[in-house]
Each structure stands twice: as C-alpha cells, then as structure tokens.
Amino acid sequence: MNKSLQMVYNYHETTKHAQHKYARSLGYMDWSTQPDPFRVYNGVKEIKLPLAMQNSTPPYHLLDAQLPSAPLVKESISQLLQFSMGIAAYKESGDSSWAVRCNASSGNLHPTESYLVLPPISKEQNNKSNLFHYRPKDHSLEELASFETSFWDELPDNSFILGLSSISWREAWKYGERAFRYTQLDAGHAWQAIVVSAKMLGWKVTRLDSVSDEDISLLLGLTHKSKFFEDETPDMLFVISPQDVKSELNIDEMIKDIPTEFEGIANRLSSSMQKWDIIPAIEEATSQEQIPQAKTQKNEIIRTPSKESKDVVLNRRSIHVMQKDISTITKEQFHNILSSVAGSLDAKENSAHLSIFVHQVEDYQSGLYILVRNARDIDELKREMDSTFSWTDTEFEQLFLLQTKDLSTNSKVISCSQDIASDGAFSLGMLCNFTSQIEKYGAHRYKELYWECGVIGQQLYLEATSMGLSGTGIGCFLDDDMHTLLGLTNNKYQILYHFTLGRGYVDSRIMTRPAYE
C-alpha cells in the first residue's frame, strides 16, 4: 500500500469520534485567533456586482426543466454568485452580528473560496480574459490576473470557468484534527449551491475530473505562497456553460497562457494559528492525481409546486432545535425528499447510501431503513451489514426497511447526544463505499466521497426549505457506534456525514436583516 493511501486510512481512523474519546481539538474557542470569515485581496482592482434581489427566478420545482440560458454578462454572473456563494442574510443577537450564506458550512465557518476565469465580456476587462476572486462580503470581484488565450475556442459560446479552494484553518480553529472532513463537506455544499444557482440561469455545471490539484493551484494563483499567511488549497474546477461539456476537458492551453505574476496580497485571517500536523499531511496525501469515475445518468427529480427558487436558497438555514411535537411529515413529503437525492446529482456513479432513522413519517413504521443509491453495492451491503436485518421492500423503489424499532435514543446518542437527531421527522447517516473506492481511484477519492456527501446535504437543505421544513447537517457523530448499529465490522463501508430533517424552532430573539443593504 502506498504512503498516500496509508495516510488516508490513518487520518480517517485517527479523527473518529467515540463516546469517551473525541478527535483531538483544543476543546475550547480561542477567540483571540478566530479567523476572518472573508478572504480579501489587498491592492487589486475591485468590480462591484449589481445585486440580483429584484431578478425573477424560476419556481424551484421547475429547475430541472429545460430552461432558456441567460447571456454571459455581469448581471447573470452576479446572480450566479449571489445565490450560491453570497450572503443570504445577517443575523443579530444583542451586540453580536454574523453573516449567513447560501451555501451551508460547518459552524458557519466557511472555508470555501470561489474564483472565476472569464473570457472578455465587458469593457472593464480590456478585451482580455481575467481571473477574479469572488468577495462575498461586498458582492464584488477582485481582479488577480489579466491575459490573452485561445482556450475559449474549445468551448461553447458563453462558457467560463469557476474554481473552488479551501482554507482549512477556518475549520481547524474550532474542530482541530477532524476539520479536514468538514472542509471537504463544505466544498460539496458549495458545489451543489453553484449547480442550483446555475440552473436558475439555464446553465450547466460540469466538474473537470481530469485536472490535477497542481493545475488548479496554478490557474487560481494558489502556488504564490508568499501572498498567503494561511494555506489555501485547491478543490474543484468547473466549466459553466449553456451546454454540457466533457468532464475530461484539457486546460493545458489556459495554464500556458496564465501569467506568472498575480496581483494582490491575501489578507491575514488570524493573528496566529494552532498547528495540527495531520491536516497538511492529509491535504498532501489527497492531492494525488484524480482518476475519473464511471459515468451514469443524472437524477430526474419530480417536485410538487413550490416558491421561487431564489426564495428557497436565500431562506436555507441550519437549525439548532427541532420542534418534536410538530415534526411529523407526510409520506409524499418523505418520498419527494428522497427522490431529490436518490440518483446521481453529477452524472457520476453514486457511492453514498442513506442509512435512515425514521421517527415521524406518516404511513411508515419507526425504525431503521436504507436508501441504496447505487444497486452495484446492494449484495455486498447485505453481506456486510447485520445478518438479522429484514431488507423489506417499501413503496419507494430503492428504500428498504431493515429493522422496526424506536431508535430515537440511538440516533441522538450517535449524533453526539444532539436532540435534533431524534426530535425531527427522520435523521440519517451517509454510508459510503469506502475502501474499494479509495483503492480503485486513489487517495484523491477520499475528498471526492466527502464532496458527494456535501452535495447530498446541500440538496436536502433546499428540499426541506422548499417544503417549509428545516434541516441540519451533523458533522459530530460517533463513527464506529453507527457502524456497530449497522452490523459493520470492517471499513469497507464508512459513515461520513449525518443529517436531520423536521420542523425547526425559530428563536424570535435573533433578528434578521438584509445581506446587502
């Protein structure tokens, strides 16, 4: 086994939570080093973007229809960014104020940064292609590089590049060694937030899965280490276009044309940092060349009529308290939620299955269920999981009843004794095909599995919001306690993320004000 794979397995085991031994962290909030949640490049040209609040957007339930594509202009780019990576609102309580964004994030810490590479589309670009950093605090673009390239000739008209990167220190500040997991989940949240925002404009999003981390770093300027106090690492690169494009697109031409010098110096986020050696070690191990996954058909989603799509993304929230007495949902709601994530969301094979604790769903018995998102794994899951499970068919084609039992206490204890896991309609753990995926596709696949789970989580947030329900991603859970409940005795399948859904309590003492007044 190579060193990168060994590091992945070592990191995953080391950062598991158990009842009497949580993953290492400071154990308290060092407020003197709290990271700035907003990356700013000093000494660059800033382009203010027009706010999109007054823009009409399609009803949420029609987002998967064939919508006409918007032109590639400043206004459409503004809308894409505002309704994906932008601020949704500010919350206030007493003297405290904090921003809530459209993309979900563990602890609202937001390690994910976004960059655009645009062809010449406006006078402000001087007829050149440009690399921009998106600055959500001010809803603006910061120009980092200007150059000429023929790369765009390979793409449909009105196509451009969007890149994501992560600053893991923002998560490590609070969560210590487990932070890399949350950073990757947040990248998945951001990915799906961008996909949904692009759908409002009739645009397609394709992740380039043959591009190396090194090339993403070169393109986004992350290799200029002297410009950064805190490390910023590459995540994903997307083509956004009116048409689907090949995920194997070669970007060598763009890399060749990108300048060697970039504008601006990144702001320092903290006065000092606590070092966790295992974080840069797992970042390096998973920066290996990625291997494209098998392709499949994208999920086809059928929804009931709902509100405007911008209202859904702007009102997505993580809740802290479930109202147990009113969290029962209907069978139709349950099925609609499951259908939104049952198939592939990115036209690649699924590896995450949903182990579901049903608490309050009409016409469903309380108990343990599993939504198998890839039939490839069903026989192995039956062999690996508890042999007493019934695997009874339900009305939902891919959903199986494993055990009839009140598991509300179990779900709460496994989710670090959080009541939200037991007081809602249902909660779940995302059970991933683990060792075979990592050994087949390499260490980089470890990140991709978390991205898939983050994508599912973001979609569950939006589905819940569209129905007037609430959801919350749960990164704190007792890994092997969940595996034991499922009867798993090895690491062929591993739980990477938990989620809960129901009706949340809204604290009237916390005030809301507009994001961009």
Image (cartoon, rainbow, N blue to C red):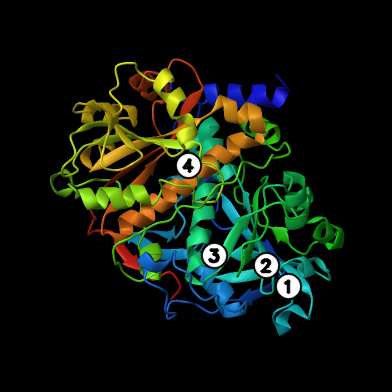
> Marks 2 and 4, how far apart in space?
26 Å
The answer to the question of whether label 2 and label 4 lie on touching residues, with beta carbons closer than 8 A, is no
Image side of residue 465 versus residue 359, left or right: right
Q: What amino acid type should be assigned to the residue bearing mark 4? A: Cys
As drawn, the label of residue 453 is: 4
Residue at the image position 26 percent from the left and 37 percent from the top? 394
Query: Where is mark 1, residue-wise?
Result: 119
What's the residue type where badge 3 is placed? Pro
Q: Position of residue 476 (x, y in %)?
A: 40, 34
10 Å crowding of disc 3: few (<14), some (14-19), many (20+): many
Name the N-terminal-most of marks 2 and 1: 1
Residue 160 - label: 2
Front-most of residues 445 and 176: 445
Earlier along the polypeptide chain: callout 4 or callout 1? 1
- The earlier-in-sequence mark between 1 and 3 is 1
Residue 136 image label: 3
Q: Amino acid at mark 2?
A: Phe
- Give the SS element for disc 1: loop
Q: Quadrant of the C terminus?
A: bottom left
Distance from disc 2 to disc 1, alpha carbons, whole Å, reads: 7 Å
How crowded pointer 4 is (Cα within 10 Å; few <14, some 14-19, many 20+) is rated as: many
- Position of 288 with respect to 30 (left or right) is right
CB atoms of marks 4 and 1 within 8 Å:
no
Q: Name the spot of residue 14 as percent of width and height, x first.
A: 54, 22
Q: Residue at x 61, y 48 (%)?
A: 166
